[in-house]
Image (cartoon, rainbow, N blue to C red):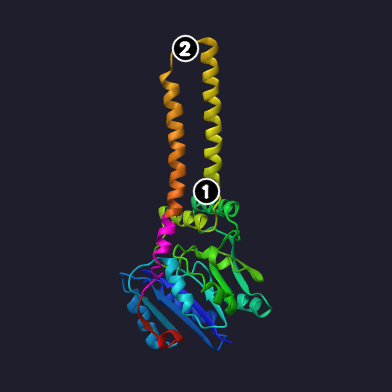
Amino acid sequence: MKISVVTPFYNEEEVIPIFFEAITSALSGYDDFEIICVDDGSSDSTLQQLISCRAIDPRIKVVELSRNFGKEAALTAGLQHSCGDCTIIIDADLQDPPEIIPEMIAKWKEGADVVMGRRAQRKSDSLIKRMTARGFYQTFNYFADDPIPENVGDFRLIDRKVLQIINLLKEKNRFMKGLLSWPGFDVAFVDYERPERAAGETKWNYPKLFGLAIDGILAFSTVPLRLSFILGFVSSVFAVGYAIFLILRTTIQGVDLPGYASIMVVSLTFSGLILICLGVIGEYLGRIYIEVKQRPIYVIKKLHGDSPADRT
């Protein structure tokens, strides 16, 4: 049995020593494992530290990307270089505790194909972040054709056969929480309390999180397009009805003095609805445009460590 651990890194120089100590400690009871670290174009000493750690421990593999492609692409690169019987995805900040990895492996041995780490509490997050996270999961699951479990991030264990299916998914706009949940299979959960970040600062701000949420909803649902159609249809019905009302009133009561305010309100309201619908359509068109160009999801600059991908 071989265990693979996949972790994306971007400017995480402060947490690297703590990370490897925690991971190797959690996996100390297993003979065969590898740690695949994907450097996503870090501008600090992250890459140099990862290569140094690789020189000390050959079980560490480093995938060096040519520039920053984003966490979703970096995670994809790590998964495509994993060769374990099971693969564990974990962030470098250690807010997903490595201590529960043995419990996840135990559930996998019992027959689960996917073992998800589920946050029982989010005390380390601010009130605003907890509220927005809950709102996202509720909104996503309302719109999406394939719901995702609430309070479950990327931290999970996946069986080799599940990984092979995920690696077949080639879309460029990647929302990994959705892609990792899409194959299905037998799922188990391990609950944990999310601790504070081990070191360093988060790279996710609210604009980035909002953008990720939009990408997720648009990648797994066409409901926004359907809502745009419904909104346009209802607005058209209202406009036709109002036009009939004006014609009848003018016919019966004669010409009335037109009101500037009412005309502006109606004009601005319908203009706003049109722009919203066009914006939704534009978001989907933009994603289609990116997909048809068929550019690679990521570009590898160098592989540090022996793996099947080194020999291709």
- Identify the residue at image location x=45%, y=22%: 262
- Position of residue 258 in the picture relative to residue 101 (left or right): left
Observer-nearest residue: 258 or 51? Answer: 258
The residue that label 1 is drawn on is 225
- Position of residue 240 in the picture relative to residue 45 (left or right): right
Observer-nearest residue: 303 or 94? Answer: 303
Label 1 is placed on what type of residue?
A: Leu
- Residue 229 locus on image (x, y percent): 53, 43
Label 2 is placed on what type of residue?
A: Val
- Identify the residue at image location x=44%, y=36%: 272
| Placement of the C terminus among the 4 image quadrants | bottom left
Say few, some or many: other residues with alpha carbon within 10 Å of mark 2 (under 14 / 14 to 19 / 20 or more): few
Tell me if residue 191 comes above or below residue 57 in the rendering: above
Query: CA–CA distance between discs 2 and 1?
Result: 40 Å
- Residue 32 locus on image (x, y percent): 54, 88
First in sequence, mark 2 or 1: give its number.
Answer: 1
Is 2 covered by the magenta stretch? no
Segment colored magenta: 286-299
- Identify the residue at image location x=50%, y=66%: 95
Is 294 covered by the magenta stretch? yes
The residue that label 2 is drawn on is 255
Observer-nearest residue: 125 or 80? Answer: 80
| Placement of the N terminus among the 4 image quadrants | bottom right
